[in-house]
Amino acid sequence: MNLAVKNIFADLSQGAAGEEELLILRANSSVRIERIVSHRNSSPPGFWYDQDDDEWVIVLRGGATLEFEGEEFVEMNTGDYLEIPSHVKHRVARTGDGTIWLAVHVK
């Protein structure tokens, strides 16, 4: 067996404002785990995520504001996590520079 320890904070992008980097850490037919690094990012105007899968998300570093359909805003800071059920429309209103997320999508 060849086990390799990896670090969630390794190889972070130093992107410019508005950029986002997504790295799939693990995926199979039931689950997808992603690391997302956001640099003062926001969803495009009028864009809404409407996902088929439930999503569990945690902010590992930094902060962000999510907007849900109906103009509900949720502030998230380091250590905060949230479960977003499938087909709940949401968008990223804004993130801080170098915000690091862990997102788990479950079918």
Image (tube, helix red, strand yellow):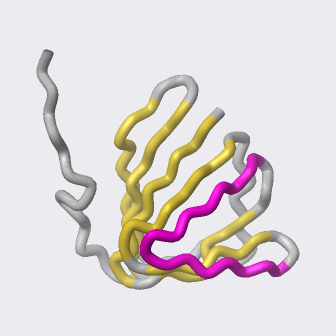
Residue drawn 14% across the image and 33% down it: 4
Residue drawn 24% across and 74% down?
14
Q: Position of residue 91 (x, y in %)?
A: 67, 69
- Looking at the image, is 106 positioned above or below residue 104? above
Residue at point 61%, 73% (across, down): 92
Q: Is residue 24 above or below residue 12?
A: above
Q: Residue furthest front?
A: 79
Residue depicted at x 44% and y 56%: 102
Q: Nearer the viewer, residue 90 or 9?
A: 9
| Quadrant location, the N terminus | top left
Residue 30 image-quadrant placement: top right
User: Does the magenta-highlighted stretch encompass residue 81?
Assistant: yes
Q: Is residue 36 left or right of residue 50?
A: left
- In the image, residue 15 lies at what x, y percent? 29, 74
User: Relative to the observer, which residue lies in front, 15 or 69?
Assistant: 69
Image quarter of residue 53: top right
Write the start and end of the magenta stretch as one range. Answer: 71-86
In the shown orientation, is residue 101 left or right of residue 72? left
Image quadrant occupied by the C terminus? top right
Q: Magenta span: helix, strand or loop, mainly?
A: strand
Residue 96 on the magenta span? no
Number of numbered labels in the structure image: 0
